[in-house]
Image: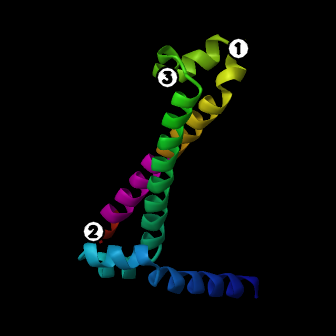
């Protein structure tokens, strides 16, 4: 019974996603979209997640740049935040918002690279079928 409910939720989400502006734009831009969508319905979800993550990464990059200017972060810290956080514990509080923003941005960048690899491997396996 629980599985049927989850399948129903997934079908509803898939139909909502099919009408999402991102999915419609991808359908127009990708000629093999229909074939891939039939073979692997989750591809649209992955590509929508990738697009959303790229938008968030752009916003976080702008936030990092704004914090660097606003907090007057020294160039040596900007060049290598990780060395700074590991080596100097005393002044870390002063630049903490900048450091957290950089770490969050880097996590999003890593997530994007993993998602791109997942999409590429899925498309590759679809083409080999």
| Vertical order, 60 against 6 (above or below) | above
Q: Is residue 95 visible?
A: yes
Secondary element at tag 2? helix
Q: Nearer the viewer, residue 107 or 89?
A: 89
| Separation of residues labelled 3 and 2 (CA atoms) | 43 Å
| Separation of residues labelled 1 and 3 (CA atoms) | 16 Å
> In which quadrant will I find the N terminus?
bottom right
- Residue 78: % across, % down: 49, 22
Q: Nearer the viewer, mark 3 or mark 2?
A: 3
Q: Nearer the viewer, mark 1 or mark 2?
A: 1
Q: Is residue 32 magenta?
A: no
Sequence order check, earlier mark of 1 and 3: 3
Q: Nearer the viewer, mark 1 or mark 3?
A: 3
| Separation of residues labelled 1 and 2 (CA atoms) | 51 Å
| Vertical order, 59 against 91 (above or below) | below
> In this rendering, would 127 be left or right of 108?
left
At x 47%, y 72%, the residue is 42
- Reading the image, the residue beneath label 1 is 89
- Residue 93: % across, % down: 72, 22
- Reading the image, the residue beneath label 2 is 127
Sequence order check, earlier mark of 3 and 2: 3
What numbered label is drawn on residue 78?
Answer: 3
Binning the other alpha carbons within 10 Å of mark 3 as few (below 14), some (14 to 19) or many (20 upward) gives: some
Determine the main secondary structure of the stretch shown in magenta: helix
Secondary element at tag 1? loop
- Which portion, as a residue range, is magenta? 110-124
């Amino acid at each position: 019974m629980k599985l049927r409910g989850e399948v129903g939720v997934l079908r509803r989400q898939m139909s909502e996603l099919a009408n999402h502006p991102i999915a419609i734009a991808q359908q127009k831009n990708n000629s093999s979209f229909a074939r891939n969508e039939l073979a692997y319905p989750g591809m649209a979800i992955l590509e929508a997640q990738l697009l959303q993550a790229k938008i968030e990464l752009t916003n976080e990059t702008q936030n990092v740049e704004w914090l660097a200017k606003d907090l007057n972060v020294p160039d040596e810290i900007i060049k290598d935040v990780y060395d700074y956080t590991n080596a100097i514990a005393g002044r870390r509080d002063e630049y903490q918002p900048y450091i957290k923003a950089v770490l969050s941005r880097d996590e999003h960048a890593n997530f994007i690279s993993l998602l791109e690899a997942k999409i590429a491997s899925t498309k590759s396996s679809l083409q080999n079928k």
